[in-house]
Amino acid sequence: MAELSDTAVVLIDPYNDFMHPEGKLNPALKPFNEINTLENIQQVVNIARDQKIPIFYGLHQQVNANSFMGWQHMTKANARQKQMKFFEEGTWGAQIYQGLEPDASAGDVVVSKHWNSE
């Protein structure tokens, strides 16, 4: 049987552009919205906080004007991100959804992706 000390929650890209109804990618998540996934995630985060369970945040690379400079072989996802500018650095869409923010004092860990152009 697992101990609570062996337990963690993993949140992937809880950015406004995904989670918020006005986010750039939210319309593509219709099934996500229909089954109250956001409310369930918020409940899991609250329980983790109450039980002192750490949360690991896997965050997608944010983009800026130079993110894809010199790239010769972009994936469809990269091209879409460049065009739509979702998770754009410094914007509301690239902020973590309110109430899901990491808390270092609770033992949360933030891990972000990085790109290279090769």
Image (cartoon, rainbow, N blue to C red):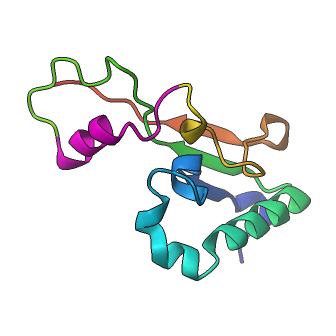
In this view, which residue lies farthest toward the right? Answer: 50
In this view, which residue lies farthest toward the bottom? Answer: 35
Quadrant of the image occupied by residue 36: bottom right
Q: Name the one closer to the observer, 101 or 103.
A: 101
**Residue 40 location in percent, x, y?**
70, 73
Quadrant of the image occupied by residue 68: top left
Residue 15 seen anywhere in this rendered image of the structure = no
Check the picture and name the quadrant holding the N terminus: bottom right
Horizontal side of residue 45 vs 38, given as left or right: right
Q: Which residue is drawn at 35% across and 19% down?
A: 65
Quadrant of the image occupied by residue 37: bottom right
Horizontal side of residue 105 vs 95, given as left or right: right
Q: Which residue is drawn at 10% across and 34% down?
A: 73
Horizontal side of residue 68 vs 54, given as left or right: left
Q: Which residue is drawn at 78% across and 69% down?
A: 43
**Residue 13 location in percent, x, y?**
52, 49
In this view, which residue lies farthest toward the left? Answer: 72
Q: What is the total number of numbered labels drawn onto the structure image? A: 0
Horizontal side of residue 79 vs 14, given as left or right: left
Q: Is residue 81 magenta?
A: yes
| In the depicted structure, whether residue 25 falls above or below residue 36 | above
In this view, which residue lies farthest toward the front? Answer: 22
| In the depicted structure, whether residue 58 falls above or below residue 111 | below
Query: Magenta part mainly helix, strand or loop?
Result: helix
| In the depicted structure, whether residue 66 falls above or below residue 116 | above
**Residue 19 location in percent, x, y?**
58, 57
Q: Which residue is drawn at 83% across and 43% down?
A: 106
The stretch of residues the image draws in magenta is 75-89
**Residue 67 location in percent, x, y?**
32, 23
Check the picture and name the quadrant holding the C terminus: top left
Residue 94 seen anywhere in this rendered image of the structure = yes
